[in-house]
Amino acid sequence: MSDPASEIAELRAALAAQTARAQAAERDLAQARALASCTEAMIQQLKLEIAKLRRDKYGISSERRARLIDQLELQLEELEAAATEDALAAEGTAQGDQTNTVRAFARRKPARKPFPENLPRERVVVEAPTTCTCCGSDRIVKMGEDITETLEVIPRQWKVIQTVREKFTCRCCEKISQSPAPFHAIPRGWAGPQLIAMVAFDKFGQHQPLNRQVVRIAREGIDLSLSTLADLIGHACVALAPIHALIERHVLEASRLHGDDTTVPLLARGGAKTARLWTYVRDDRPWDGGAPPAALFKFSSDRRKEHPTRHLAGWQGVLQSDVYGGYNDLYLADRSPGPVGSALCWSHGRRKFFELADIKAIARKGKKVAEEISPIALDAVKRIDEIFAVEREISGLSAATRLEVRQQRVAPLVHDLHDWMLAERAGMSKHNPVAKAINYMVAGKGRWEAFTAFLDDGRLCLTNNAAERALRGIALGRKSWLFAGSERGGDRAAFMYTLIVSAKMNDIDPQAWMADVLARLPDLPVSRLTELLSWHWKTKQDAVNAA
């Protein structure tokens, strides 16, 4: 008969061995998961880099590549987060195991950029030891320190500023003396400039309607009604009107403008109708013109051609745009003070061919790529991309240099493209989609001359992307604010977009700029208002930060 004690010992040993094997298997599984997650994240990151390199090489304005890059970036966010979770889980399973360590993963961890120098630093000193951790001696002296920086954010705080004006009475004449009340951004000064700027920027810059802001502010313990916030917006528009007028004058002083428009739902009886927000952008940076960039926005309840004609009344120069016929009255020879020159956008022309050569889009529609893809359209895209490649090389150079390079390298490509398109169109039916894409560029009186105007003027751009970039925020925010409540509301939105987009084009924080402008406007004479324009404000802030 076996000894019970020995059997129990054997069972315990077997259980311990089984537990050890299970723990080892669990560690191996966690390591495998972490390795797989990190590898997948690395592959996705390489795909993203390849897509960006292809975009830089073959064309910044490729719609499909832009969508692909956005999708890859979203996927990379999820994969990076999953890789971090799995790696931490693998490290957790290895804790306490002195013989088995987590293997190194071939993952490029994100490199942290240094924190801005202008951020305030809060120094938290860990209590220093009083004795040596080795021998216990108290004869220790400081030889240096190690600093670990942690970025933290403080939730916004509300406060009430009390402006006190003391009263004094005279013992002789018994008259009362008191300092005059300071000027405020709005009458009676119940709302500070930071609050006004926050509400305005959240509504028009972050596309947060006032009703949502009311709910968020209420969660922070402040009871402000919708009408109260709307009142702040009205006061801000009145106070900032002089700055808006200066920006408008600056934009319309340009000899070259980008023009475009986008749809805006306008609340109307029985539903909503389609209104328009127009933008006119001054951006001389591509030819090193020196003038600061700015954008002017206008609102209209429809897209009739009378609106751009009214917006640009009295202006003369070159307008870069698409082929929208609403600009045609500007090009009339008998226009006063003179006809506006036309320069059409090559991105729009390229897009017509690209849609016929987009392999993935055709495949998504369930069609056979080999049968549906247009070799002529693909050839046109390649020819146009050669022109874009040269243009990217001369971006930011002087107008004279750009003109010289265009005459030497771009003009032959453009003339060859024109001859090739005419030859290909001659053998096509007028209903052929490729023929329609060719006609977009060459058909119509003066159409090709407008597309090739950039060859004779180094200031002109190949595309109208500057205007499209100015409208991008509006297109992204439409789903948030749904519609403009009235035509006055549309005009107000155009007013604020002019201020916000112009500030963004000059690489400054629109909210900080607006708050400082509202604070300084009441005490600033009219002769010094130009100091508050975003580009002058940025120069002063840079000097202050440098000092």
Image (cartoon, rainbow, N blue to C red):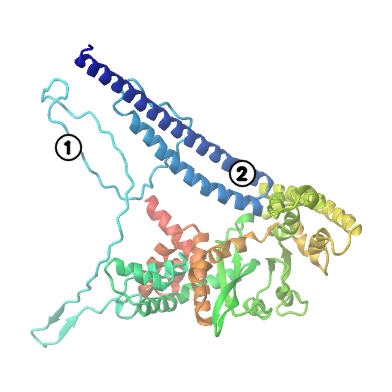
Mark number displayed over residue 127: 1
Report, in whole angstroms, how far the alpha carbon at label 1 lies from the one at label 2.
50 Å
Q: Which of 104 and 490 lies nearest the eye of the viewer?
A: 104
Q: Which of 277 and 375 lies nearest the eye of the viewer?
A: 375
Q: Nearer the viewer, mark 1 or mark 2?
A: 2
**In this orientation, does residue 215 appear?**
yes
Q: Label 2 amino acid?
A: Ala
Where residue 85 sits, quadrant-wise, is top left
Label 1 Cα neighbours within 10 Å, binned few <14 / some 14-19 / many ≥20: few
* Quadrant into which the N terminus falls: top left
At horizontal 30% and vertical 77% (from top left) the residue drawn is: 189
**In this orientation, does residue 111 appear?**
no
Where residue 356 sits, quadrant-wise, is bottom right
Q: Position of residue 142 (x, y in %)?
A: 19, 30
Q: Which of 125 and 241 lies nearest the eye of the viewer?
A: 125
Q: Residue furthest right?
A: 427
At horizontal 29% and vertical 47% (from top left) the residue drawn is: 121
Q: Position of residue 426 (x, y in %)?
A: 91, 59
For the residue labelled by badge 1, is the local secondary structure a helix, a strand or a loop?
loop
Contact between marks 1 and 2 (CB within 8 A): the answer is no
Q: Which residue is mark 2?
A: 51
Q: Residue furthest front?
A: 1
Q: Label 1 amino acid?
A: Glu
For the residue labelled by badge 2, is the local secondary structure a helix, a strand or a loop?
helix
Q: Which of 348 and 273 lies nearest the eye of the viewer?
A: 273
Where residue 90 sits, quadrant-wise, is top left
Q: Is residue 63 above or below residue 201?
A: above
Residue 329 horizontal side relative to residue 80, left or right: right
Q: Is residue 247 above or below residue 292?
A: below
The disc, 1 or 2, on the residue closer to the chain's N-terminal end is: 2
